[in-house]
Image (tube, rainbow, N blue to C red):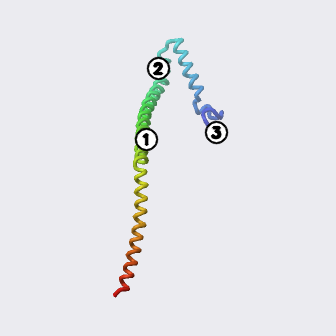
Amino acid sequence: MGGIFSSNKNKNKIISFDSLNENLISNYNSNNNSNNNSNNSNINSYIEPLIFEINKLKEENQKMLVEIKFLHDKNKKFEIEINKIQNNYGKEIFTLTEGYSSLQKDIGTLLNNQKIISDVLQKFP
């Protein structure tokens, strides 16, 4: 696997985290020892983009937290509505289904009776 931490041939091509950290520490130490403005701006050139990215990630995190809360609340509302339907209308739906089934049987019976009556009436002149 090739990556930042492996293979000697890529050491010159890729700046490792360790060398970046050593560079930051050495710049910090030299800045504290000599109070040189160029070293301070050198450290700031490393730190400012990191601070910007951290702030951007914090904003994105806040947006995601708001979105997650919104979705959680929406999910809770759906659960409440589903429970209402199941609790309030479950018995009614079952009763309607039984009534529909009974009605279908009654229609079948009436059709059979109508056929019998029609057959009997055709036999009489």
- The residue drawn where x is 60% and y is 33% is 4
Which of the pair 13/125 is nearer the observer? 125
Which of the pair 76/30 is nearer the observer? 76
| Residue 62 place in picture, x, y as percent | 43, 31
The single residue placed furthest to the left in the displayed view is 125
Name the mark nearer the viewer: 3 or 1: 1
Measure how far apart labels 3 and 1 are at the Cα level. 43 Å
Looking at the rendered structure, the secondary structure element under dot 2 is: helix
The single residue placed furthest to the bottom in the displayed view is 125
Local crowd size for mark 1, using a 10 Å CA cut-off: few (<14), some (14–19), many (≥20): few
Name the mark nearer the viewer: 3 or 2: 3
Which of the pair 84/20 is nearer the observer? 84
Residue assigned mark 3: 1
Q: Quadrant of residue 111?
A: bottom left
| Residue 29 place in picture, x, y as percent | 55, 15
Q: Which callout, 3 or 1, points at the residue further toward the start of the chain?
A: 3
The three-letter code of the residue at mark 2 reads Ser
- The residue drawn where x is 40% and y is 60% is 99
Residue assigned mark 1: 75
Is residue 111 placed above or below 63 in the rendered structure? Answer: below
Q: Which callout, 2 or 1, points at the residue further toward the start of the chain?
A: 2
- The residue drawn where x is 40% and y is 50% is 89
Is residue 28 placed above or below 53 in the rendered structure? Answer: above
| Residue 17 place in picture, x, y as percent | 58, 28
Measure how far apart labels 3 and 2 are at the Cα level. 37 Å
Residue assigned mark 2: 41
The three-letter code of the residue at mark 1 reads Asn
Q: Which callout, 3 or 2, points at the residue further toward the start of the chain?
A: 3
